[in-house]
Amino acid sequence: MVLPSHPRQNALVAVAILALAASTPARTTRADDPGSHERPSPGTLFQWSYGSGDSAGPDLDEPLVTDRPDFTESSVTVGRGVTQLEMGYTFVHDREPGASLDGHAFPDLLVRQGLLAEWLELRVGWTWLVENETFGNVRETRGRSSDLLVGFKLALTPQEGILPEMAMVPQMFIPVADDPVLGGGELLPGLNWIYAWDLSDRMYAAGSSQLLRALDDATGRPYALYVQSWACGYSVTERLGSYVEWFVFVPDGADEARTQHYLNGGLTYLISDNIQLDLRAGFGLSDAADDFFAGPGLSIRFP
């Protein structure tokens, strides 16, 4: 979803203010109130064909659908007038010849607020990172804030057969911090296209394709960053969910940043329809990637 300018911190951002398909299978229908004569608000901006798909937004009588803990964000919005808080802690470890890095990111906060229609939500993300870097016998510790991530999620289409449920997230880092861990001290826009399929009552597949503007850590010059992810999830029980996922960062025109591949997986547990706990862990598949990341999280919906 969001990415740092420093190549060694990509995993921190990838899991800090997540993007990802929902950790539980996507549910997008709100049943009409039989006592109401008001026309329901469309749950998506478009339909694959006339009269197809769901006629209303997320069903608030069903469990919440979250953007964490996976990297691929969910393809649904929270619903008009709904507030959803998603937060967590992330530990990241990376070792290179003669140096190592341990990072602690918290609260990995993402605030999602449904706006004027069921298909539109406002998104604001922020986190804080404490880095412990070791160079030989020298150890350095410092804390840094992220810039503010502001965006909108637009639910585009419901799933219709093999045609996916889709959403689009235009977003931008807004400078609010000196030497930010996320962002680059200037406006950094990006676009995230999300697509997902319910394969059965228990299983889903999802992916996302992103194009972001990033800054090279060595020279400060801007470059294009392409991001791709694929996830598959399975509901073990009505309350326990699981997923496995691959994602990659591909810089184009960068002076220092290199391509990074990651594999991760995790679990979600529903305390109630409005509260979810999660746990995730992952590792880098390429030399430029961070070695390991893991952490728990909490999501709360306020209907």
Image (cartoon, grey):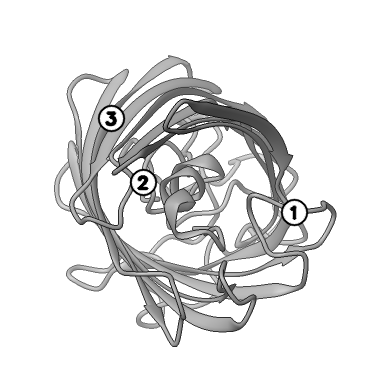
> What residue sits right under mark 3 in the picture?
266
| Residue 252 seen | yes
Q: On the image, numbered disc 2 is attached to which residue?
A: 26
Can you say whether 207 is above or below 188 in the image?
A: above
Task: Name the one closer to the observer, 119 or 204.
Answer: 204
Cβ–Cβ below 8 Å for labels 1 and 2?
Answer: no
Q: Is residue 78 above or below residue 117?
A: above
Label 2 vs label 3, nearer the camera: 3
Report crowding for label 2: few under 14, some 14 to 19, many 20 or more residues within 10 A (C-alpha).
many
Q: Earlier in the sequence, mark 1 or mark 3?
A: 1
Q: Residue at x 75, y 73 (%)?
A: 187
**Sequence-earlier tag: 2 or 3:** 2
**How far across and down, in percent of the image, does residue 300 sit?**
60, 25
Q: Secondary structure at mark 3?
A: strand
Residue at numbered disc 1 = 179
Cα separation between marks 1 and 3: 31 Å
Contact between labelled residues 3 and 1, with CB atoms less than 8 Å apart: no
Examine the rendering and report whether any part of residue 303 can be seen: no
Quick one: SS at disc 1?
Answer: loop
Instruction: Residue type at mark 3: give it.
Output: Gly
Q: How far across and how far down the image is residue 126, in percent?
A: 70, 43
Label 3 crowd (10 A; few <14 / some 14-19 / many >=20)? many
Amino acid of disc 2 = Ala
Q: CA distance from mark 1 to mark 2?
A: 37 Å
Query: What's under tag 1, amino acid-wise?
Result: Asp
Which callout, 1 or 3, points to the residue nearer the camera? 1
Q: Compared with residue 61, is residue 98 higher up or lower down, i.e. above or below?
A: below
Tell me the quarter of the picture where residue 127 sits.
Answer: top right
